[in-house]
Image: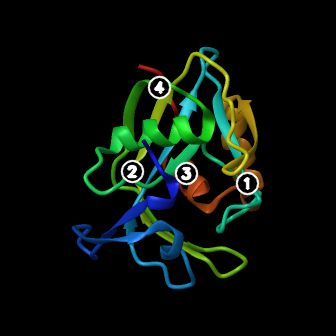
Amino acid sequence: MYNKSDECVVLLNDKLVPEGQADKRFVHNMDTPLHLAFSCYILNQEDKVLITRRSLKKIAWPGVWTNSVCGHPLPDEKMVEAVKRRARFELGFNSLEEIQLVLPEFQYCERDASGIVENEFCPVYQAVVQCEPSINPDEVMDFQWVNKDDLHRSVRSTPWAFSPWMVKQLEQMTQMTRN
């Protein structure tokens, strides 16, 4: 059984090789080491993308709109399994379909207004669901299904309203397409 309090992140060296692990509760600070993460954009049957608003309880970027789900693989966990685990934990999705890697080399380092740093090598995935989310309020405070073109326009015109990783990812993702 998944226990969030036991969650560790995989630390990476500058060549992106794993070099240990750290307790997730303590790794995100004003000098966050480079670590492994992922982002995922989830589409529905109407080909709309799910965006989520981060809970105000989040240590970094609380209350900011972002991609559908993001997180960290546990040590020795396959990335696709981590995507499924976090989608289940944050959004109540028991089944993701058509999971595909869309940005395999995405990496970023950003500091939020409180000084907390995100420093991640963060492959980006896309998936499809057939149901509505049932959000975990400790992780997500709101969600919206949006037209992909409208999302791209919104992020370009008001980047400050979105997580910096989503802004950078969408700059590189010219389109989201279903298989």
Pick whichever of labels 4 and 2 is earlier in the sequence: 4
Which numbered mark, 2 or 3, is in the foreground of this view?
2
Residue 96's tag is 4
Q: What separation in Å lies between label 1 and label 4 (alpha carbons)?
A: 22 Å
Frontmost residue, 48 versus 5: 5
Q: What separation in Å lies between label 3 and label 4 (alpha carbons)?
A: 25 Å
**Residues at discs 1 and 3 in contact (Cβ within 8 Å):** no
* Circle 4 residues within 10 Å: few <14, some 14–19, many ≥20: some
Please tell me whether mark 1 sits on a helix, a strand or a loop: loop
Q: What separation in Å lies between label 4 and label 2 (alpha carbons)?
A: 17 Å
**Can residue 174 be seen by looking at this rendering?**
no
Report whether 122 appears left or right of 153: left
Frontmost residue, 66 versus 4: 4
Q: Colour scheme of this structure image?
A: rainbow
Residue that badge 1 annotates:
55
Pick whichever of labels 1 and 4 is earlier in the sequence: 1
